[in-house]
Image (cartoon, coloured by chain):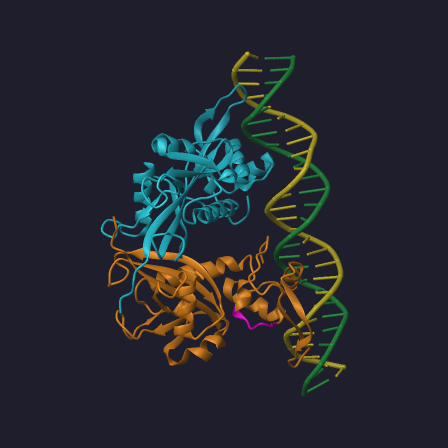
Chain colours: A cyan, B orange, C green, D yellow
DNA sequence: ACAAAAGTGTTATGGTTACACCCATGG
DNA sequence: CCATGGGTGTAACCATAACACTTTTGT
């Protein structure tokens, strides 16, 4: 009545913004299979300590990437006999979104942020497919949510937020006036009273997310 | 280096339309746990015969529901120590969408189509949450895709299609003229030449999906 | 005063909504 | 020739996009 159980892992597509371009965090593996190669951070589910898959993903992020709080959502589950040389396996894939500096600060020498359009030709397992799914999810969700804001520090200007939306969506130019009006109408960001970012020119008002978790719109950005 | 592996199952939220209302197919379980109770069709992954989780879902649908072709997509994966009395488990949940008569024809005595708003107070495992996720996915995707058409037989009238969208979206009344124009503009359905459905009144043109798989729109229905 | 970026207002456009109207059929 | 649902046309409305304009700061 019992059956052979698949190997069960979690893998995290940790996306960030590097020089205005989407990048994924790859970590050098320190054990077989694919020892020494760059891959998504991941690991076995530990049934003795993880309450569920989400908890396993959080644990992996903390251990492998030194990250404590990031936007995290389940992506999809990848499975099959062939994807892992150790045998029939399941990978619950998660999408994480976080500012680049937080990855770099805590990641050390093992991490590399790789431009989404310059991925290595070969990646271990089916990590290429998983990354593609993560990027697609981020792009898709960005059209109608505040998800891109998680690529920025807590406080940001409207111009910065617009740049992030442009980078994520791959759009050349969102009209600044329109973007401004829309994002303010949606009431998803609020000004940080009295705080501005002063450059050489007129200082910009700093904003933060009104809801610190993700907010969905009923129209497109 | 090896860890205890979670129990791995697939469960299918099989949604359909019964008297213009969304319903889910529940099957009476014939083994513990929850022997004799109604639950989602599901089963263990068989690593020796299933190529991946999708294949396992298709096998389960064929064995438990006698269904061969339905719209099927992965929903999400539910997991944890508590959801199954047998121990730490993973359920890869799939969403199936199919006309009611196909379920009833092949399901026999063990199947019951239950109105989404009249679910039993208690369902085994976390099947209530899984159903909610399935319904949410269907509703959500219906706004911008032909997914509701999979609730109808292959050929249907525009009025029928409109009714299905209304039932799924829970909208009182989609303007018929607007619906008609939009669905035709989108070029996702095509007339079946010379075929009409004649009632007492002017016969309606029959249509079918232009693309037999799901089509996504760039605007809302 | 000027350059540059922040921020506001105004108009044109195109999709959506609402509704009035015509068409085809059986009785 | 009437009742009924199928099917078409049109006008008001509203969100969006494009762009001109004003404001604020540092030098």
How many numbered discs sit on the rendered protein? 0
Residue furthest toward the left? A48
Residue A218 at x, y = what percent? Answer: 52, 50
Report if residue B172 is visible in the image: no
Above or below B170: residue D2: below
- For image coordinates 26% across by 57% down, the residue present is B88
* Coordinates of residue A148 in the picture (x, y in percent): 47, 40
Q: Which residues are magenta?
A: B151-156
In the figure, is residue D22 to the left or right of A2? right
Query: Which SS does the magenta portion mostly show?
Result: loop
B5 lies above or below B197: above
Quarter-of-image position of residue B209: bottom right
Q: Is residue A62 magenta?
A: no
- Horizontal and vertical percent position of residue B147: 53, 63
Name the one closer to the observer, B40 or A103: A103
Residue B77, quarter of the rendered image: bottom left
D7 vs A45, left or right, is right
């Amino acid at each position: 009545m019992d059956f052979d159980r698949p190997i069960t892992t979690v893998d995290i597509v940790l996306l960030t913004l590097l020089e205005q371009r989407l990048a994924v965090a790859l970590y050098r593996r320190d054990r077989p299979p694919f020892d020494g190669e760059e891959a998504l951070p991941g690991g076995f589910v530990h049934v003795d300590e993880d309450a569920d898959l989400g908890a396993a993903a959080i644990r992996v992020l903390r251990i492998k990437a030194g990250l404590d709080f990031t936007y995290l959502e389940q992506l999809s589950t990848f499975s099959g006999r062939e994807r892992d040389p150790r045998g029939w396996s399941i990978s619950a894939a998660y999408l994480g979104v976080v500012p680049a500096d937080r990855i770099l600060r805590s990641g050390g020498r093992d991490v590399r942020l790789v431009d989404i359009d310059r991925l290595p030709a070969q990646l271990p397992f089916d990590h290429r497919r998983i990354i593609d799914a993560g990027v697609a999810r981020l792009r898709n969700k960005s059209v109608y949510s505040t998800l891109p804001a998680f690529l920025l520090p807590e406080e940001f200007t409207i111009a910065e937020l617009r740049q992030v939306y442009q980078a994520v969506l791959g759009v050349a130019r969102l009209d600044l006036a329109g973007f401004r009006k829309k994002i303010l109408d949606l009431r998803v960001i609020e000004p940080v009273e009295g705080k501005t970012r002063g450059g050489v020119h007129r200082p910009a008002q700093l904003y933060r997310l009104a809801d610190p978790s993700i907010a969905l719109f009923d129209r497109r950005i």
